Every structure is written in structure tokens, then in C-alpha cells.
Amino acid sequence: MDLATLKALKPSEYEEAADGYRATGDMASDAKDAIDNRVSVELRNHLEGDAAKAAVEQLKSLSRNFHYTQTECGLVSTALNGFAFDIAVAKRKLEAAMDDARADGCTVNANGSVSYPAGRKPGDEKTADGGTVTGSAGGSPTSDALERQAVDIHPNPYYGRAMAYANRIADALEEATDADTKWAPKLRALKADDDLTVSHRDWADAQSDTGGVREAGKAYLDSLPEPPKDGSPKDNAAWWKGLSAEEQSAHLALNAASVGALNGLPAETRDEANRRVLAEKRGEYEQALKAIPAAPAKYTYTNTARGPVKVHTDAYLEWDDKYSDRKKELEGYLKGMDQIQDRFDRTGVRGLPEAYLLGYDPVGHSDGRIILANGNPDTADHTAVYVPGTKANIEKIGEGADLGDLGRSERLWAESGKMAPDKSFSTITWLDYDAPDKVLGEATRGSYAEDAGPTLRSFMEGNRAAHDETNPGNPGHTTLIGHSYGTTVVGVAAQSDIGPVGELGPTPRIADDVIAVGSPGMQADHAADLGVGARNVWAMGGPWDDQGVRQGGRLVGLGDDLTIPTDERFGGNIMKSDSGGHSGFWDPESTSLRNQAAVIAGKYERVQHD
């Protein structure tokens, strides 16, 4: 890049263009939300038939297009800001060198060379003529040594200064050229296929584009305020609030996974970040699955003395060894994604509120990581967080006719709303730990809960911080529910001393109420140990296999001193339950479900005690 071009460049114009792309991305985001949460909802609720179903499918495609537009506009905006940052640095260096040269009596020429006046060194009798020098960028130990030698020998004292200015100008021009060369292909790459369909390949490309912009924009990213190191969720909330719109956009564009996992940030921000991660990972996994060749014929027949015998083909055995495990793994990831998408698509069905994806990692903790809310917890009057137990994983988080653990949270949302129609609710499924996969062996150990407890507590603290930011002075009412081994996790979290979640006191409060459902033990021998007050601890159990889980937990020591929450000596409230076993506590129209909903809604007088 030459001197005239760099002088004429205005980084502010690129920053204005970046603002334009960011505004376009915001409009695309608003359009996506309008389609998902208003237009599609109205269409599903008021029209029936094949035409209506086809229209909903078209709207889903349009929503995906807007989501992709939002993502790509965020990347373009960040790339333009990154280019403007690099050019501004180079331009400041150029202007400083030119100003210093002029102040020293030198003249900077249009080609970047520097002319210096006549002068003489102290002690010399003769004045040396002036001249012009052209600088060089970079340099090496050898060239620098030769240049110093030339300066020492030269009779004009201005020669060395002019050479230094010329070198600084050359460095600035080279830095600007490098920025232009670096960013041009990154910006050209930020485009989709020339069609109206956002494919899995497009999302996989978006993931690649993100990596390219992140690599090119390292200097720009390094200039942005970083999240507080080892900060509390409250620290995280303050950091995010203090960022400019440009800085927030850059973090969302290039650090979506980190932003989506950061406790204390607004639910809308985490949802936006995690939905992007979900879309990009889906594109990556769909492409990877597509790349696996079809399995060859599995069997062939070979003749033996007793007749033809079916045996595996060599080709199949080779394919199975190379691809089978990876294929099952990818199919499992995609199955979990389908269940999450199904929840998104059911927004508005029977009044179901908008979903917020507060955490997502298909491979986190080996079982996958998902935190999904029905309704916005930042604005809800009442929030419930449900922690599933043994065998919970992302692949079956919303599986089956009852929609699995996601379905349980949905039923809690609907039933709680009936208890207090004038209040707003949010119910959250929290799977952010390595749940035991086996009832015998793994689920008999407290180590899984000990690892998970602080993570759950940090989430609860973040949920409180985000709510406080939206509703200063009105923390709302929060209930923490555990099922099976999830109650053990809740017990450890409630006793983890990592900072106050609720009001300050002798024991930090993790929530306003704690419910233990089918609990094998909470690593505590009394309800008062959970820090919410014994009168705010609730428990229920069932017969058959639930009795086996609870008594088994007692025997292996998941409850201190052989005590479990449904024991009277534990000191909490024992609620009536009509569950037929360990998994029926969320059956529609059940006493078990209504009792949990009454606690969530703060309608304690409507709880039926056992």
C-alpha cells in the first residue's frame, strides 16, 4: 500500500460499515424471533391441514435463513472492525513518523521517501549537502548494523534521523499492506451459496469462517476487554454490561461457545450464542456423517460340508472397524440436536413459551451439556431448575412420548402457571454434569455429585445475577428440584461454599426452596444443612423401583448417617405422591406434579403433606 492510499483511508468509514452490518444482523435476529415466536405460533394454533403444515415448514426455512444472515452479518461486522483496527494502528504510526520528520526539519515525499536539509556535525568545518533517503521495512541484524555504520560515516547529522523516519514510514506502509492482504480474502469468504437454501454445508462454512476471522483479528480481539479471570457470575454480568455494542457483537461472533457458557450473562445473550453453536455443530456433524461411505454388504455365504454358511464379508469388517463407532457417535449427537430443535418448534403449542438455550455442548462431560429454559428466567416471577439423575444424557434429553427430561420441565411450567395465572414462570432443565450411566457401581458413589455440585451452584448464582440485573431489588422466587441422583448433586451444591447465591447469612442460599424427588440421599443428614431452612426443603417418594433407589442410596451412604430426605428425622416437608414408581412424578394431572408446582409458585398452603 502506498503513502497516498494509507493517508486517504478512513478507519471510521469501515467502522460505520461494520455498524451497518451489525444493525442488519439485529434486524435478521428480530425477524427470526418474530417468525419463531409469533407468526409460526399463530399459524399452528389457528390453522389446520396440509397447507398450514407446509406453510409452517416454509417459515422454519425462512427462520433458518434469517439466523444464518444474523451470524454472517456478525462475522462481517467483526471483520470490518478488525480491518479498521489494524489500519488505524498503521495509520497512527505513519502520522507519528511524518509529524516527527516535519518537526525535525525534514520533508516527507509522496513516494514515502524523506528529504533532509543541509547540515554539519559538531566539530566539522564544512556543511554537508542535504539529500533524500528511502526507508526499508523490517530489517535484520545485518542490515541494521550496516545502516548504523552508514549513519556514523555520513557527514550530515540529518541523514540518520531522516533514515529512521523513512524506515518508520516503510514499516507503517508494510503493516497496512499486510492488513489489506490478510483481511481481503477473509471478507470475500463471508458469503453463502447463491441460492435461497441455508444448507448444513453453509453452517459448516460459517464455522470455518469464524476461525478465519478469529485468526486474522487476533490483534483486534486482544484489544477487547476480556471476561474477568476466575470471576464470579456477578463479575461476569458487570463485564458484559460494560461492553459496547461493538464489543459484545465481536465476542458473540468469535467466542460464541465461551459466551454461551458464561454464568451471569443475560438469558437472551446466552441463547443467541448457544443457538449459533448448535447450528454450526449440526452443520459440522451432518457433513462428517455424509462423508462416511455406505456400509458394504454385511454377509456372504460360503459352502461347507454341511451346506452354505452365512459369514461377515471382509469389506464389511473393515468398514465396521473404521467407521461404525464414529457413525453411531455422530448419529447420537444429531439425535440430541433433533430433540432440542423439536422443543424450539413446539413454542406456542398449548401455550408453551419461548425456549432459551442457556448452555450447549454436544460432547461436554461425556454425556453432553444442555441447559434449556421454558420462558425467560431473567424476567420470571418464579423460576424452577430441574436436575435429572442417573443415565441422563443429551441423546435422550427429550426422548419418548413424555419428551424425557425436557418434557418434565414443560409440565412443571404448565402446572405452575395454573397455580398462579397472574405470575410469570420459567422452568429449566439443567444437565451440566457427568451423570452416572450405571445404577450399580457408578450411581452408588458420591464423586459424581461432588464434581457437579459447584458447577450447579455457579449456574444458580449466575441465574440470580442475571435476574437482579433485569429486576434490581426484586430477586424473584427460585426452586431447585432434583430427581434421583440429581438430588445428590443438589445436596452438594447447596452445601458448596463458593459464595452467596441469595441473601447473605450464616449459610449461603442456593434457592428459596429445594425439592428432592425419589432421592437416594443428599450428602446431608438434616434438611437444615441445605441452607434454605428446613421448612423450605421438600421431599417425595414412590413405591417399587423408587423404593429400591431410595433404600439403596441409604445403604451405600449417599445420605449422611443413613438418612434420606423422605425420612421424618431429616426434618423437611414430606409431600404426598401418587407416582407408581421412580419415573412417574411428572405424570399429567398427578398429585406429585401438582405438589411440585405449588412449591414452585410459592403456594405452600396448597401442598398436600404425607
Image (spheres, rainbow, N blue to C red):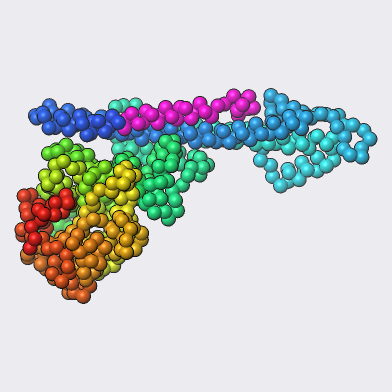
Pick whichever, 237 or 182, lies toward us.
Answer: 237
| Among the 4 quarters of the image, the one containing residue 311 | bottom left
Name the quarter where the C terminus is drawn: bottom left
Residue in view at x 17 percent, y 68 percent:
571
Q: Is residue 19 magenta?
A: yes
Pick whichever, 333 or 444, lies toward us.
Answer: 444
The magenta segment: 1-29
Residue 305 vs residue 6: left or right? left
Residue in view at x 13 percent, y 69 percent:
568
How many numbered marks have been drawn onto this rendered protein structure?
0
Name the quarter where the N terminus is drawn: top right
Answer yes or no: is residue 465 visible. Answer: yes
Residue 44: image x %, image y %?
A: 14, 32
Pick whichever, 510 or 394, lies toward us.
Answer: 510
Residue 22: image x %, image y %?
A: 40, 31
Above or below, comparing residue 566 to residue 606 in the picture: below
Residue 523: image x %, image y %?
A: 24, 68
Characterize the magenta stretch by its predominant secondary structure.
Answer: helix
Pick whichever, 383 or 206, lies toward us.
Answer: 383
Above or below, comparing residue 524 to residue 336 in the picture: below
Q: Is residue 297 magenta?
A: no
| Among the 4 quarters of the image, the one containing residue 528 | bottom left
Above or below, comparing residue 172 to residue 461 in the picture: above
Residue in view at x 63 percent, y 35 percent:
93
Residue 81: image x %, image y %?
A: 48, 34
Residue in view at x 94 percent, y 35 percent:
125
Answer yes or no: is residue 277 visible. Answer: no
